[in-house]
Image: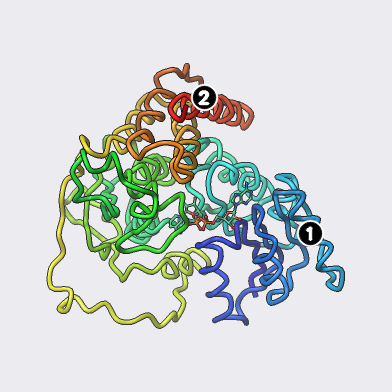
Amino acid sequence: MKSIVILGSTGSIGTNTLDIVTKFPEQFRIAGLTAGSNDRKLEEQLRIFKPDTVALTDPAAAERLRERCRDLPVEILSGIEGQSQVAARPGVELVISAIVGGAGLVPTLAAIRAGKHVALANKEPMVMAGKLMQEEARRRQVNILPVDSEHNAIFQSMVGHRREDVRRLILTASGGPLWDMPLDKMRYVKPEQALRHPNWKMGPKITIDSATLMNKGLEVVEARWLFDVPPEQIEVLVHRESIIHSLVEYSDGSVIAQLGLPDMRTPISYAMNYPARMPLDPPPLDLARIGKLTFHRPDHDRFPCLGLGYESLRVGGTMPATRNAANEIAVAAYLSESIGFLDIANIVRTTMDAHQPVDVSSLDVALEADRWAREKAAALVRALSR
Ligand code: NAD
Ligand code: MG
């Protein structure tokens, strides 16, 4: 039985992971769960899965949970330190990293430093400090197994092949809910419309990132560090149906891809139980019924956030962390209707232009770039919402 911790257990990836654990109770034991501030949902989960330890980043939410769970033998921690303690718990084999945003960097790195294998959904830490995370993982001899569907597909398409034979990684993108919308209409898109993703049901932040294509911009950086492939060899292909989850092209012209219906439980379970596959029993992929699969080049004019992803990688150092932090602030401001949809890209661009990148030589350097960019982006949001 594998002892696991889920960071961000109350979110979309977190609850999908618990769904798998419920189906295969003899294979996994939940040792720890964490969330940001959702004490109600965490309480439900801890009464079912009975972890030894849980953590909430918000101290007031942790206090509420302690009040209500006096009857249970569970340790309730708080703050980012609490998240890291749960991540580094002795006896835990695998940590599912599923917090949203840069908040996951410190606990995910704590898991790696404590010698845990990591199933990584939380892509933002890889964007902020990918080189550092990979160096730590090598030093501790732990695997970082990608959960993000595209990276999981690439990982699967590389099993049994030689890294030096790879010519291109091709990340597919659904195009998101606004793919067909003209630019003059995009200006006025309300969050409720941008949150209506055609193929995937996910948390709000990544859904807005899918609408701007910032998500794909983050994924290019994620792929660069996960697979040690330079940005010139990473391409993005818009594929509206989300059936081909990504492809790898080899030097002899062979292209290997992974296909499946869009269901995050497939990549999550593969990362949880690699190399064995779990009998999830999804409906069969009926390609004859689907009939045709379509492909388009990305439109950089309407979706500048994808290009900002490549640009941040080319500049390197703390630039990707800066871009990520500015995006987190801009997306939150858009979701609270303080700024418009097109302001997201402008805020990220302006923050990047003002940044003096340095090498990400330590965790502190990444965190400082993150802090700086959040402040800068927040000032830009204030100026726009005045
Ligand atoms: P979500 O918003 O549904 O859930 C986020 C989780 O993180 C919640 O448990 C929340 O309590 C927790 N959290 C938020 N702020 C926190 C903080 N400061 N400290 C500790 N915990 C905090 O998000 P999601 O859609 O599940 O996405 C999680 C991550 O996985 C993101 O990085 C996303 O890009 C990535 N991802 C998600 C999907 C998907 O299908 N949802 C697919 C691919 C990748
Ligand atoms: Mg993805």
> Residue at 62% of width from left, 44% of height from top?
109
Task: Give coordinates of residue 361: x percent, y percent.
Answer: 57, 26
Q: Nearer the viewer, residue 150 or 273?
A: 150
> Residue at 33% of width from left, 32% of height from top?
308
Residue 233 image label: none
Q: Residues within 10 Å of mark 2 (few under 14, many from 20)?
A: some
Q: On screen, 225 above or below 258? A: above
Q: Secondary structure at mark 2?
A: helix
11 relative to 161 in the view: left or right:
right
> Residue at 71% of width from left, 49% of height from top?
58
Quarter-wise, where is residue 177 in the image?
bottom left
57 relative to 23 in the view: left or right:
right
The residues bearing labels 1 and 2 have C-alpha atoms spaced at a distance of 33 Å
Task: Give coordinates of residue 74: x percent, y percent.
Answer: 81, 66
Residue bearing mark 1? 64
What's under tag 1, amino acid-wise? Arg
